[in-house]
Image (tube, grey):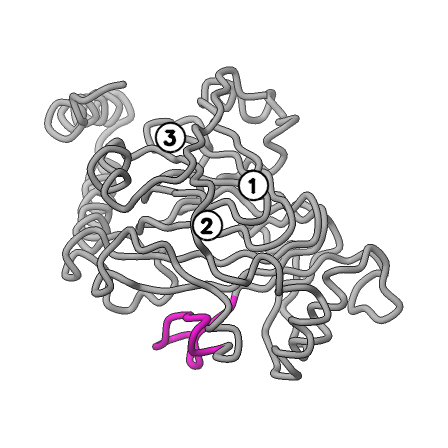
Amino acid sequence: MAGHRFPVPRFEGVSQEQFIEQLYPQRKPLVLEGIDLGACTSKWTVDYLSQIGGSKEVKIHVAAVAQMDFISKNFVYRTLPFDKLVQRAAEEKHTEFFISEDEKYYLRSLGEDPRKDVADIRKQFPLLEGDIKFPKFFKEEQFFSSVFRISSPGLQLWTHYDVMDNFLIQVTGKKRVVLFSPRDAQYLYLSGSKSEVLNIDNPDLAKYPLFSKARRYECSLKAGDVLFIPALWFHNVISEEFGVGVNVFWKHLPSECYDKTDTYGNKDLTAASRAVQILDRALKTLAELPEEYRDFYARRMVLHIQDKAYSKNFE
């Protein structure tokens, strides 16, 4: 297991002013309790969602195992009518299924054209719009997307980061969320924005020895809780029971910083992408050197990056 564990702090009855002036600048996860989210926390039952959501087709992830892996793609994409998805996701065993009778379902709502349109529950599920209120802790012009999520009991999503700040609103059910600081990226065995370590509770430390150094921040979310996840914070989510959540993403940096083709909120900032491309070209150039020289100059480059780019504001 990860060596250092910290609870995510919880705050009740936080005002917009308190959040923006006192909590938000700390750039750390926190759970907000007592936020007015509307009637959704009591209304969004399986029967209600099935009725209101109707038979609109939705694209879903279907997995035969509880720990979903986006790197190896241990799931398949399928489509189901929304009402059927809700009913199946609430079941432990299925009489109708794609892979197995205990398969897991995960919905991450999409825009009408996922290549061009962002997800917004108010547009894709307009009959649910009146039931939910988003926390008014950011400016309306900063809004990017609102993602409707439905998960089977026991489903665990891979550890990953997003490039935008977001609120995870737990509407119904319970989730456990484990987060890791951006400063601990070096311990998470990344492939792109995702960690290769699937079993974060009992990791294979022979394969992933550095994982034990990662600081682990953990919280449990119940209906009505709102988790603030700052950009770049890694998060791993397990649905402890059937539940519905909504992620609200917003742009906390100027719009020109973000990739204009990003409809999911997870493409690296344009300057970061350019820097990575430049680094890749530099590494190809280093490969022309004999091993002894390549190693020496690579270490010098690392030291130069640390000196010029690492933050001095250590915790």
Amino acid type for the residue under numbered disc 2: Leu
Q: Is residue 112 above or below residue 287?
A: below
In the rendered image, residue 274, in percent from the top left (x then y), is placed at 18, 52
Question: Where, quadrant-wise, is the C terminus in this rendering?
Answer: top left
Q: Are marks 2 and 1 in contact (CB under 8 Å)?
A: yes
Give the residue at x 32% y 48%: 165
Q: Is residue 31 above or below residue 265?
A: above
In the rendered image, residue 75, in percent from the top left (x then y), is placed at 66, 59
Give the residue number, with chain letter if any, for mark 2. 168
Which range of residues does the magenta coloring cover? 109-124
Q: Is residue 175 left or right of residue 114?
A: right
Q: Earlier in the sequence, mark 3 or mark 1?
A: 3
Q: Earlier in the sequence, mark 2 or mark 1?
A: 2
In the rendered image, residue 135, in percent from the top left (x then y), is placed at 36, 54
Give the residue number, with chain letter if any, for mark 3. 181
Give the residue number, with chain letter if any, for mark 1. 221
Give the residue at x 53% y 39%: 196
The number of callouts visible is 3
Label 2 crowd bin: few (<14), some (14–19), many (20+), radius 10 Å: many
User: Under tag 1, what secondary structure?
Assistant: strand
Which mark's residue is nearer the viewer, 3 or 1? 1
